[in-house]
Image: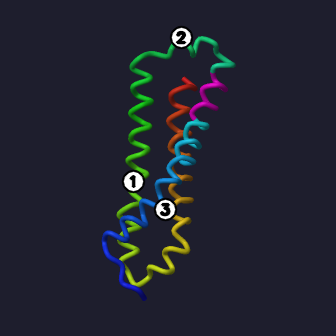
Amino acid sequence: MSSVTLREAVSDAIKYWEPRRIPYNALLAVIVGSYFLYYSKGAPSIRSKISFDGVLGLFLLAVLANIAYCAAYPVDIFAQWSSYRDLWLRFRWLLFLVGILFAAILTRYFSFGMFAG
């Protein structure tokens, strides 16, 4: 077991999590875009429902999704300071997988509510 400093743990967490933020946001954008396109085909009036407040709400949800993504940092840093660091580094992709599935489900739920009517 090697001792890791806070600086090393934080640097490693940033190095791991930040490149994964791009596919995370891309997946959520695809879900929202898919629901918008699907429901705008069936009801052309949906485009008339797009408002400044709706865009602001969508922006707010995107910011909240990214704040939720940051929840991985304390978990990662804490796990790196534990005696299970080596095991954690091999399996932390599971946290990413669970987080992205959870975010996708929430995004689907909110997209359905926004666009299905």
Which quadrant of the structure image shows residue 53?
top left
| CB within 8 Å, label 2 to label 3 | no
Residues 21 and 62: in front is 21
Q: Which amino acid does label 1 sit on?
A: Cys
Question: Which residue is label 1 attached to?
Answer: 70
Please tell me whether residue 16 is drawn above or below residue 1 in the rendered image: above
Principal secondary structure, stretch drawn in magenta = helix
- Calculate the distance from the C-alpha at mark 2 to the C-alpha at mark 3: 41 Å
Which of marks 2 and 1 precedes in the sequence? 2
Mark 3 = which residue?
16
Between the C-alphas of marks 3 and 1, the distance is 12 Å
Q: Is mark 2 on a helix, strand or loop?
A: helix
Q: Quadrant of the N terminus?
A: bottom left
Q: Residue 9 carries which label?
A: none
Between residues 25 and 36, which one lies in front from this camera angle? 25
Q: Which of marks 2 and 3 is nearer the N terminus?
A: 3
* Mark 3 secondary-structure assignment: helix
